[in-house]
Image (cartoon, rainbow, N blue to C red):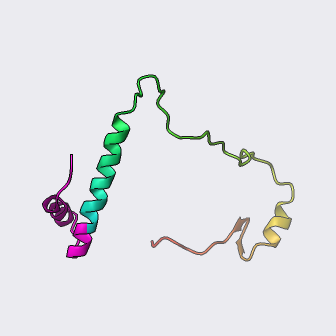
Amino acid sequence: MSIDLAQVQKVAHLARLALTPEEEQQFTTQLNSILEYVEQLSELPTDDVQPTTRAIEVVNVTRPDETQLADNREELLSIAPEQEGDFFRVPQILQE
């Protein structure tokens, strides 16, 4: 399978991309290289390969969230830039 210049132009038109003739030629060459590589990969025997989502195992290294009661409420409110009653006052971000 290969892609020709007309197909690159059609896809660029559908994606509303304005490509120069040089870019069209460059993308034609690059896309054909990608397709050749995919064809090579499809020749590999993968019947006994288990599906994976990642090549390596990823582990979350953040600590779990744990709620704690604050016994120094007044102290925390006293260092807030602004407060309103028993609450922190923050800048408004939504319109009414």
Query: How many labels were placed on the picture?
Result: 0
Q: Whole-percent x and y of residue 90?
A: 63, 72
Q: Is residue 48 visible?
A: yes
State which quarter of the image contains the C terminus.
Answer: bottom left
Q: Magenta span has 53?
A: no
Q: Residue at x 72, y 44 (%)?
A: 64
What span is colored magenta in the figure? Answer: 1-25
Instruction: Specify the principal SS of the magenta part.
Output: helix
Q: Whole-percent x and y of residue 85?
A: 72, 69
- From the viewer's perspective, is residue 36 above or below residue 74? above
- From the viewer's perspective, is residue 25 above or below residue 53? below
Q: Is residue 19 visible?
A: no
Q: Residue at x 24, y 61 (%)?
A: 28
Q: Is residue 12 left or right of residue 80?
A: left
Q: Whole-percent x and y of residue 31?
A: 29, 56
Q: Residue at x 81, y 65 (%)?
A: 76
